Amino acid sequence: MAEYSKEQIFEELKKILVDELEIREEDIKMESNLFEDLDLDSIDAVDIAVRMQKFTDKKLPPAEFKKIKTVNDVVEAVFALI
């Protein structure tokens, strides 16, 4: 099983946001709100969850997923899975 640091998870998440969702890299910070600051919608959020699942081989439970609001929330939720 692969282990990732929070920094590695953040970098992977940033790559997804930049490459797939066309978010400017300089706009992505740990405290960035996915919906307000980065202007994502629920479809984008699901896409992120699926891609992070492929990255870690772990599925984010829907209850956890609903709590996610910021970039840091994604990193913490994924980190808690591994």
Image: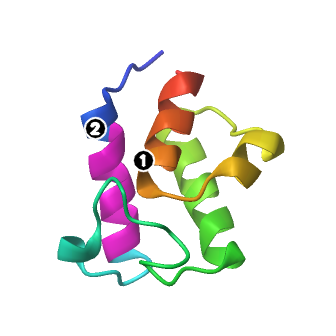
Circle 2: element type: helix
Q: Is 24 contained in the magenta span? A: no
Q: Is 16 contained in the magenta span? A: yes
The secondary structure that most of the magenta stretch takes on is helix
Q: Is residue 12 above or below residue 17?
A: above
In the rendering, at what x and y percent does residue 18 appear? 31, 74
Q: Is residue 43 above or below residue 58?
A: below
- Amino acid type, residue under disc 2 in the picture: Gln
The residue closer to the viewer here, 58 or 71, is 71
Q: Are marks 1 and 2 in contact (CB under 8 Å)?
A: no
Disc 1 packing (10 Å; few <14; some 14–19; many ≥20): some
Q: Residue at x 35, y 26 (%)?
A: 4
Disc 2 packing (10 Å; few <14; some 14–19; many ≥20): few
Query: Depth-wise, is mark 1 or mark 2 nearer the camera?
Result: 1
The residue closer to the viewer here, 59 or 54, is 59
Of pointers 1 and 2, the one earlier in the residue sequence: 2
Residue assigned mark 1 = 72
Relative side of 10 to 81, left or right? left
Q: Residue at x 62, y 54 (%)?
A: 49
In the rendering, at what x and y percent does residue 68 appear? 62, 52
| Residue at mark 1 to residue at mark 2: CA–CA distance | 13 Å
**Quadrant of the rendered structure where residue 15 is?**
bottom left
Residue assigned mark 2 = 8
Residues in magenta?
A: 9-18
In the rendering, at what x and y percent does residue 71 appear? 43, 55
Furthest-left residue in this view = 26
Furthest-top residue in this view = 1
Circle 1: element type: helix
- Amino acid type, residue under disc 1 in the picture: Asn
Residue 15's label in the rendered image is none
In the rendering, at what x and y percent does residue 73 appear? 51, 46
Furthest-right residue in this view = 63
